[in-house]
Image (tube, rainbow, N blue to C red):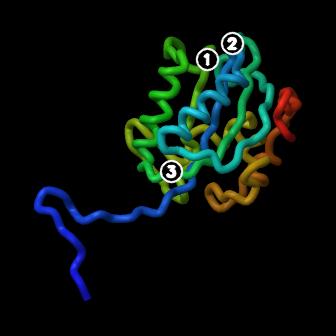
């Protein structure tokens, strides 16, 4: 059997299986629905290919409630990026689309959270997966249950987690022109 080609300057090529990651996206400044679409397009161009996307939902603000409603959605992406590389990509896309961080839980053009990365549990200063607040947020669980109801978080499916919430105030938005339901 022939040995693989080796280069003295580079390690042997290794094929990595793409991972599935689950993202939460939202905002409440500007045309958020268009911004979410733009964000998903930029993510796909840069290594996080869209697999599935929820509908858009109008949701009440969470954490800081004296602001206008949000539009939220969730997406499943396939990526060869590591969890921290995916987070860096999400942050760079946010910045490119005009996100300025000036107030915790305050108004924003776009927010992109890494909710789940495969079955990994990560607890580092800059990334906690599963996302530390996702099970407290109906605005995450309702759209996530639409596209990944059987996804298990802590031994309980997303659909089961979502049923624990009063979804009052969360409205599924109709498809926009040119979109299919």
Please provide percent x and percent y for residue 11: 21, 61
Give the residue drawn at x 83%, y 32%. 178
Give the residue drawn at x 55%, y 48%. 130
Give the residue drawn at x 50%, y 14%. 100
Which is nearer the eye, 175 or 138? 175
Q: Is residue 27 above or below residue 43?
A: above
Q: CA distance from mark 3 to mark 1?
A: 24 Å
Check disc 2 and report the residue beneath it. 30
Which is nearer the eye, 162 or 91? 91
Q: CA distance from mark 2 to mark 3?
A: 29 Å
Which is nearer the eye, 130 or 174? 174
Between label 3 and label 1, give the one nearer the viewer. Answer: 3
Is 33 left or right of 45, judged from the image as shown? right
Q: Is residue 16 above or below residue 41?
A: below
Q: Quadrant of residue 104?
A: top right
Q: Secondary structure at mark 2?
A: loop
Check disc 1 and report the residue beneath it. 109
Structural crowding at the residue carrying mark 1, measured as other residues with C-alpha within 10 Å and reported as few (<14), some (14–19) or many (≥20): many
Please provide percent x and percent y for residue 154: 62, 57
Q: Is residue 170 above or below residue 106?
A: below
Q: CA distance from mark 2 to mark 1?
A: 7 Å
In which quadrant will I find the C terminus?
top right
């Amino acid at each position: 059997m022939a040995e693989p080609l080796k280069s003295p300057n580079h390690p042997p090529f290794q094929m990595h299986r793409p991972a599935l990651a689950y993202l939460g996206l939202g905002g409440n400044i500007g045309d958020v629905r268009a911004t979410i679409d733009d964000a998903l397009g930029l993510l796909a161009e840069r290594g996080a290919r869209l697999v599935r996307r929820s509908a858009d939902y109008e949701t009440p603000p969470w954490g800081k409630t004296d602001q206008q409603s949000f539009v939220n959605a969730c997406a499943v992406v396939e990526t060869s990026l590591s969890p921290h590389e995916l987070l860096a990509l999400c942050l760079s896309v946010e910045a490119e689309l005009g996100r300025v961080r000036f107030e915790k839980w305050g108004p924003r053009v776009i927010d992109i959270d890494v909710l789940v990365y495969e079955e990994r549990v990560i607890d580092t200063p800059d990334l906690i997966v599963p996302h530390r607040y996702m099970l407290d947020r109906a605005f995450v669980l309702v759209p996530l249950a639409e596209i990944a109801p059987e996804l298990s978080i802590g031994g309980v499916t997303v659909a089961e987690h979502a049923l624990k919430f009063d979804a009052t105030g969360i409205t599924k938005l109709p498809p926009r022109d040119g979109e299919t339901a």
